[in-house]
Image: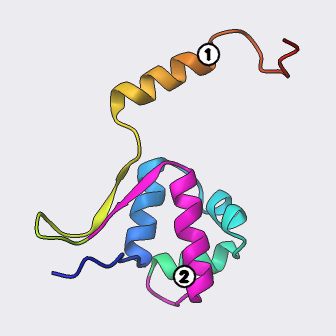
Amino acid sequence: MSNEQIFDGPLARSARALVRVSAKDVASTADVKKSELKDFEKGRDDLTEQQEHRVLEALEEFGARFVRDDSHGGYGVRLKFNRAKVRAIERWEDEGGTSADDDV
């Protein structure tokens, strides 16, 4: 089995659904048109190598982790953080009132 990073439209669409982020937000972060992203996700069109890389990085910023094809299983996507960590992060974000610059 190959150990190369596989990234295609259906995987991008799955990652976006998994991290619960809109196509508009991913496209904006990756500096691609929303229509280009949607066409890529549906297999109707290809992105350039640079655009694919930016989309992959944007999805990783939103919390996706891409799994390589190896002897243990096929390629895919999963969440960067497990459920317990997500709850802890959400709890930390809710503490201390509104966010502001620290004057300490």
> Residue 2 location, x and y as percent?
22, 82
CA neighbours of label 1 inside 10 A, class few (<14), some (14 to 19), many (20+): few
Image quadrant assignment for residue 77: bottom left
Residue furthest out toward the right: 103
> Does 30 sit left or right of 52 as displayed?
right
Residue furthest out toward the front: 104
Gap between marks 1 and 2, in whole Å?
37 Å
Q: Residue at x 38, y 73 (%)?
A: 10
> Residue 90 location, x and y as percent?
53, 23
Look at the picture and state if 46 lies above or below 104. Answer: below
Instruction: Looking at the picture, tell me which residue is in the foreground, 22 or 29.
Output: 29
CA neighbours of label 2 inside 10 A, class few (<14), some (14 to 19), many (20+): some
Q: Residue at x 35, y 25 (%)?
A: 84
Residue type pointed to by label 2: Asp
Q: Identify the residue under disc 1.
A: 94
Look at the picture and state if 50 lies above or below 90. Answer: below
Image quadrant assignment for residue 7: bottom left
Q: Residue at x 47, y 76 (%)?
A: 41
Count of number-bearing discs: 2
Quadrant assignment for the C terminus: top right
Residue type pointed to by label 1: Asp
Of helix, strand and loop, which one carries label 1?
helix
> Does 29 sit left or right of 90 as displayed?
right
Does the stretch in magenta take in 66? Answer: yes
> Residue 68 location, x and y as percent?
29, 68
Mark 1 or mark 2: which comes first in sequence? 2
> Does 49 sit left or right of 81 as displayed?
right
Q: Residue at x 56, y 64 (%)?
A: 57
Q: Identify the residue under disc 2.
A: 39
Segment tinted magenta in the rendering? 43-68
> Residue 33 location, x and y as percent?
70, 76
